[in-house]
Amino acid sequence: MNAQEYLDLARKEERERRNNPNQYDLYSYTYVWLKSRRPDLAKELTEQFQEIELQVNAAREVEHVLQLEQLYDNRWEDLHDDDIPGL
């Protein structure tokens, strides 16, 4: 799985996780099961993630900056909406 495919699928999972408070436990259970029953596969997946980790982190940082810019822009517009004419 490349970084873009992971990010696309992870966004979908994150939305589902927000809607299900037990989702974290499911992910934790899945990880524990995989690591204890299939350590070879867990190791392979960890190594594959490490290959794309820098790209994933960079993409997340860009998303974060864009979200901050959007918040700033929205707040700036709100401030202008609050302007009192004639002052």
Image (spheres, grey):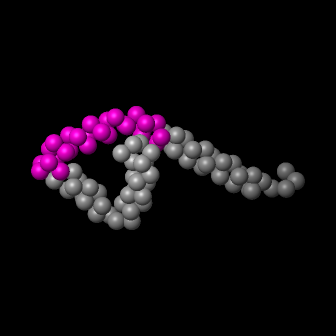
Q: Residue furthest front?
A: 1
Q: Main secondary structure of the magenta part?
A: helix
**56 or 69, which lies in front?**
56
**16 is within the stretch colored magenta:** no
Write the residue at 39% across / 52% down: 10
Q: Residue furthest left?
A: 37
In the rendering, at what x and y percent does residue 20 appear?
34, 65
In the rendering, at what x and y percent does residue 41 appear?
19, 45
Write the residue at 23% across / 40% down: 44
* Apparent side of residue 87 relative to residue 48 in the rendered image (left or right): right
- Against 66, residue 22 (above or below) is below
Q: Residue furthest right?
A: 86
In the rendering, at what x and y percent does residue 80 appear?
75, 52
**41 is within the stretch colored magenta:** yes
Write the residue at 20% across / 44% down: 42
Write the residue at 16% across / 42% down: 40
In the rendering, at what x and y percent does residue 13 appear?
38, 57
In this rendering, the count of numbered labels is: 0
* Apparent side of residue 37 relative to residue 73 in the rendered image (left or right): left
Q: Quadrant of the N terminus?
A: top left
* Apparent side of residue 30 relative to residue 8 in the rendered image (left or right): left
**21 or 56, which lies in front?**
56
Range drawn in magenta: 34-60
